[in-house]
Image (cartoon, rainbow, N blue to C red):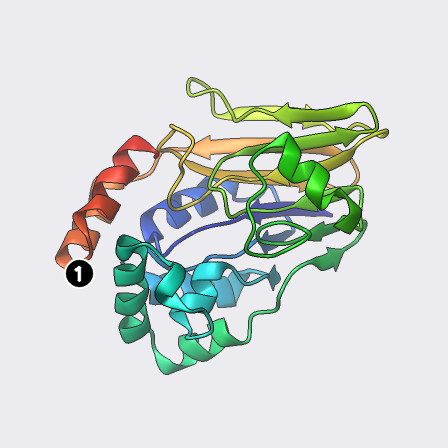
Amino acid sequence: MRYLIISDIHANWESLEAVAADAEGRYDQILCSGDLVGYCADPNSVIDWVRRNVALVVRGNHDKACSGFEDLEWFNPVARAAALWTQAALTPGNLEYLRNLPKGPLQVEDFQILHGSPADEDEYLLSSFDVHQAQSYVERDLTFFGHTHMQGGFFWHRNGVRRIKRTPPDVAEQRVALDPDSICLANPGSVGQPRDGDPRAAYMLYSSGERELVYRRVAYDVAAAQRKIRQAGLPDQLALRLALGT
């Protein structure tokens, strides 16, 4: 089975369109590690597409916040403003869809998908220390996660943790072979709001038969996404950061 793995779309329709076009014909099924909404201005278009096309989705913290399940007290003012705007913009059907998204991890073949950390869906996996803390909660040798908006991940071996670096900014694709002696936690990166210094939309392809991760980056119409954010009256910082990948 060939999988398209996506995460952290954050209501960015232009980036999602670009990813779908770039990956066309290269997968059999789509999986998503959460955060369909928040930050950008097309929550209904994104959710409608996900409902039509994605086989399995786990909830993210913004999905919970925008459907009323998360206390906005812990969100920064920009994220809180976007969540409140999204709550008001969602159709009743899409609001109900977000509310019913399952908590990760979900098991798929011999791997699992989740949003944050295997230990806690809202925690970040950013460092070797984080991986060591979460290691006892890992149920499969391969885990796909999101939340950090940073493409890459980690190999955990009894001798230590090795980081998988993001795709270099001058190439579109990076292939990483899975190590049979290591546990792998792989982050496809963010479709809609990358924070690893590369503004291109990020995603991943994985074939269970080949045991190889294919990290991809694709350019999209950032200006169009920025224009919609500003027209919606969302904080301008959300538009500015799209061009910077931060």
Q: Residue 164, position in %: x, y? A: 62, 26
Name the one closer to the observer, 214 or 165.
165
Does residue 174 lie above or below 9 as drawn?
Answer: above
Q: Is residue 90 visible?
A: yes
Does residue 239 lie above or below 47 as drawn?
Answer: above
Residue furthest to the bottom: 92
Name the one closer to the observer, 9 or 234.
234
Q: Position of 97 compared to 229: left or right?
A: right
Split into 4 quadrants, where in the image is the C terminus?
top left
Q: What is the quadrant of residue 42 in the picture? A: bottom left
Residue at 42% x, 80% y is 93
Q: What is the quadrant of residue 156 in the picture? A: top right
Does residue 71 lie above or below 244 as drawn?
Answer: below
Q: Position of 95 compared to 102: left or right?
A: left
Q: Crowding near pointer 1: few (<14 within 10 Å), some, many (20+)?
A: some
Q: Which residue is mark 1?
A: 232
Q: Residue 220, position in %: x, y? A: 33, 38
Q: Residue 10, position in %: x, y? A: 39, 54
Q: Residue 213, position in %: x, y? A: 66, 33
Q: Identity of the amino acid at label 1?
A: Ala
Name the one closer to the observer, 148 or 130.
130
Residue furthest to the top: 170
Name the one closer to the observer, 114 or 200.
114
Q: Position of 172 compared to 243: left or right?
A: right
Q: Secondary structure at mark 1?
A: loop
Residue at 65% x, 60% y is 104
